[in-house]
Amino acid sequence: MQNFDPNAKVKAVFLYNFTRYFEWPEKMKSGNFIIHIIGTNNSLSGELNRMATSKQVGNQKLEIKNSTSLDATIKPHIIFILSESSDMLKDISAKYKGKGALIVTEKGGLAKSGSAINFVAIDSKLKFEYSKTNAVKAGLKTSEELKSLAIAVD
Amino acid sequence: MLVIWHNQYAQNDLLFDAQKLCNEKNYEQAIPLLEKVIVHPETKGDPASWHIRSYAYLQTYKQSGPTNTAKISLLDTAISSALVSISLDSAKGYSDNNYAFIKNGAATYYKLGTILLQDSLNTGKSEIFYQKYKKYTSIINPSFDFKQKDIEYYNTMGSIFADQYMRNNFDQKHGDIAKMALLKVLELDSKNISANINLGILYYNQGATLMRMMDYDVDLSQLDVIQENAKKLFKQSLPFMIKVYELDPKAEKALESLQGIYSALLDEEKANEFKQKKEALNKK
């Protein structure tokens, strides 16, 4: 079988798409567009780094950061909390409240516990729950269009 | 192989000369003479004429190179001449050699058929040669059971094209040929492990390729369609790999593949189950 993780690719496509549906605060529209992965998923990191070589967000270059805990020196536009790190959601959402970081998770129920986007598997396909409330709390301007593509939780 | 025949028509100089040339291994020079011999009223009904013609063509073909497909008409003529000789040979004076020629021709067709499998442009020709092998083998041995040979041939075709599919950046044409061949194997032997594994991997790879080729900025509605199509292919791969697992629960390739397929289908529970089975196998 080919050495390729289809789910990592799908998540990368979703993350890139999300950059079209949110508007980040003015102060975050310069410098690199940072996606910070909390946890370990080598396939996903590899896929996002591949994406970063060919895509950018507006005029901002994509930059992928990876750590197993929060790093205060990183000012992320998207924080993707992997399943194994889900326990950190509460702290992360409190810390980044109003700072313009889109919090993405991948464990059942987390869109109701602080993340704006939560990946869920439905009928063998990856879909996402969307909490507009949490996105606004994070300091992002949201698009109504995204709601029609998502499983809205509020 | 030496050619021995009764020289009943020694008065016919052409046949005598052709025989002489063959004995001197000048087969190509013998052929024009033999073309006249087989239409000459005195010799056209003689099994010896057709027998020596068969021999001369067979040897000329061999001299042209062991796997020469451009000169394959020489082999065809050799075999058809042997068949005419057999039909005329009521005394069966030449039958052993005639059958040996046909057997030799059949084996050559089989060899050419498998060699041509390596070339994706010649799959059709390969199958034609393989069918000729079967046709001529049936003449030598009418009760020959081709099932195992068919399995071997189509499994080889399937494996080669599944490999070509991977090597040629997942080119659909190669994948389709592999699929056709492997499904033929399973029609004959549904428990064939190699065909089940290769088909399972092939369907999985086709699904994965859909994902891999997708651009990062494909819109979300299109992403859903691609996921749906890939899911169908992942699901198609599943029964083949499950079959392998049922036939051989310790087949590492099946355990690893099932882990990958279930993971692609976002069934992490099942993916972990097979991951653990594979790890347990490796601990033993």
Image (cartoon, coloured by chain):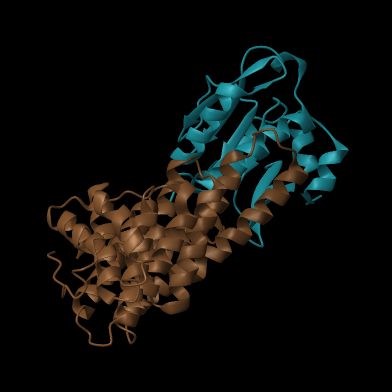
Chain colours: A cyan, B brown
Say whether residue B278 is visible.
no
B119 horizontally vs B14: left or right? right
Residue B135 lies in what quarter of the image? bottom left
B41 horizontally vs B179: left or right? left
Residue A88 image point, x, y percent = 54, 41
Say whether residue B43 is visible.
yes
Residue A55 image point, x, y percent = 63, 24
Residue B29 image point, x, y percent = 25, 49
| Picture quarter with the C terminus of chain B | bottom left
Above or below A111: residue B179 = below
Q: Which residue is more in the foreground, B209 or A99?
A: B209
Above or below A57: residue B259 = below
A17 horizontally vs B245: left or right? right
Q: Which residue is more in the foreground, B188 or A103?
A: B188
Residue shown at 59% from the left, 39% from the top:
B213
Residue B241 lies in what quarter of the image? bottom left
Residue B231 image point, x, y percent = 62, 58
